[in-house]
Each structure stands twice: as structure tokens, then as C-alpha cells.
Amino acid sequence: MKREGCDMRGFLSFQVLWLLSRKRMTGEALARELGRRRGEKPKAGTIYPALKDLREKELIEGSRSGKEVSYALTQSGRKEVRRATLYFCRCFGDVFQES
Amino acid sequence: MKREGCDMRGFLSFQVLWLLSRKRMTGEALARELGRRRGEKPKAGTIYPALKDLREKELIEGSRSGKEVSYALTQSGRKEVRRATLYFCRCFGDVFQES
DNA sequence: CTGTTAATATAGGACAACCTATATATTTAT
DNA sequence: ATAAATATATAGGTTGTCCTATATTAACAG
């Protein structure tokens, strides 16, 4: 299928780190919050592979409680989200100053 | 090669539309401005295929003058950049309110 | 206990965003 | 005229972001 407009994918892992920098969350809670912002909730096949990748990079760590896994940033995760946020603002800062 | 941090690719086409919404620019000028913001200038193989894609979607149009092609938004390009900016702000607005 | 639902997980595929070449055309300098 | 530099273009490859399945496990209701 051809996209009509410009592609708006990207920065999923950054957005996950950003959300976790504010509050510890489960995969489902993350998906719900992303859905609230994007208009459409990402599917399981989007969110869980992303969480796995961040876990393998040791930027986040999860603790299971029943069927849920609650994620939080590790120390390098906190460092990384600071770095990434600076980069993000340098790239897109002016997009916000005018809305 | 494994990336250490989180991936920060994405929104190239949006960023190009955004820059063109402010000023008519050539491919080279766009690459320079992206380089200024990102810290590294994107290569020719990144920028020109992106411009070709946006041209084929009729979101931008270019006019050649010598060796340079100067790009500007079309009418649907202007519409698209408004739509995309709203979406972008809804997703990432709070990232900026705290820096 | 058994069936359903909720949360997590993985496989496999499409596509944009990046790269490294390599090529062509125009302009500028020698 | 010729060489070098500049701007544009395309081919081909990797990776992250998305999807649609399909499967597993824990909680919950009957």
C-alpha cells in the first residue's frame, strides 16, 4: 500500500524511554499512552519487540508481577534519554515554538 | 554494527517539508541545514531519494537553475505539513516543555 | 476445573531512513 | 581546452518501525 502523505514513523524507542523517564510503566500502559498520542494504539508486535531491544541494550529493566511486566529506566537508560532529548530538541525545537 | 543507544532515525520527509515550509531551498541547502541540526550532514544517497519520493507524491516541486534544483512546497505539501505538524506536536509536545 | 480474557512474546513481511559506492552534468579554476 | 569541484541522481545494502498472524501464560468468571 502506498502512503499518501509523509511518513510519520520513527523514534519509537526514544518515545518509550521518554515515557519511562517520567513514570514506571507496563508494556500495555505504554501502548495505551502511545495510542492516546498517536491516535492509534500500536500492536503487540510493535511494542514488545521494541521493549526487548531496549532490555537487551540494558537501557530498561523489567520486573514481572503476575502477568504484567513493569519497566523502568536503568542508569544508562537515564543517561541515554538525556542525550537523546538534547539531540531531539536541536533537530525539532522550532517545530514547537510555532504552534 | 550494533547501535549502543536508542535509534534516532525518522521523520526525514517531515523535516524536509518543515524546512521547505519556511523557505525555498536546494537539496544541498537542505542537507547543510539537516547537518547543522543533527551534527552530521546526511549523504547524497539519503537526501536525494527522499526529495524524489516527495516529488512523486507531489508534496514538493523543484525548478532547476544550472546545476541546482530549488524546491518549494506544492499546495498539498502545505496542507500535509500542517497535518503532520499537529500530529508531531501531539506525540512529542511535552518533550520540549521540559528543556 | 474450565473457558475466557488480558498481558506478554515471537516469527515473518513491508517500507522509510540511513549508509557506501558510482555516475552524470554544470560551473569554476588552471 | 582540461581539470577539479559542486550539485544532483541511482543502485544496492542494513536496520528500526510498523504490521498481521500465532502462541504462551496468568488472572478471573462460571
Image (spheres, coloured by chain):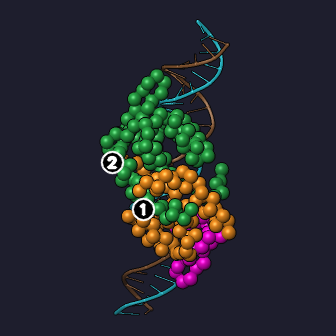
Chain colours: A orange, B green, C brown, D cyan
Residue B68 lies left or right of residue A77; in this view the side is left
In which quarter of the view is residue B56 placed? top left
Q: Residue A73: in sight, yes or no? A: yes
Number of marks in picture: 2
**Measured along the vertical axis of the image, is residue B72 above or below residue A71?**
above
Instruction: Name the residue beneath numbered marker 2.
Output: B79
- Report the residue that reaches farthest toward the front: A97
Residue located at (41% from left, 44% from top)? B21
Q: Residue furthest left?
A: B75
Q: Earlier in the sequence, mark 2 or mark 1?
A: 2
Q: Is residue B27 left or right of residue B5?
A: left
Above or below residue B87? Residue C20 is: above
Report the disc number at residue A45. none
Out of C2 and A69, give the one closest to the viewer. Answer: A69
The residue sitting at 64% across, 66% down in the picture is A77
Residue B71 x, y percent position in the rendering: 42, 35
Q: Amino acid at mark 1?
A: Arg
Residue pointed to by mark 1: B90
As drawn, B84 above or below A81: above
Provide the chain ID for the residue under circle 1.
Answer: B
Give how far across and how far down residue A3 sits, in percent.
37, 49
The percent position of residue A26, horizontal first and vertical second, equals: 52, 75
Q: Amino acid at mark 2?
A: Lys
Subunit ID for the residue under disc 2: B
Residue stretch in magenta:
A48-74
Who's the residue at 57% across and 65% down the image?
Answer: A17
Residue C25 higher or lower than C9, as above or below: above
- Circle 2 packing at 10 Å, graded few (<14), some (14-19), many (20+), is few
Q: Quadrant of the C terminus of chain A?
A: bottom left
Q: Residue at x 66, y 57 (%)?
A: B4
Measure the C-alpha gap from mark 2 to mark 1.
17 Å
Q: Nearer the viewer, residue A93 or A23?
A: A93
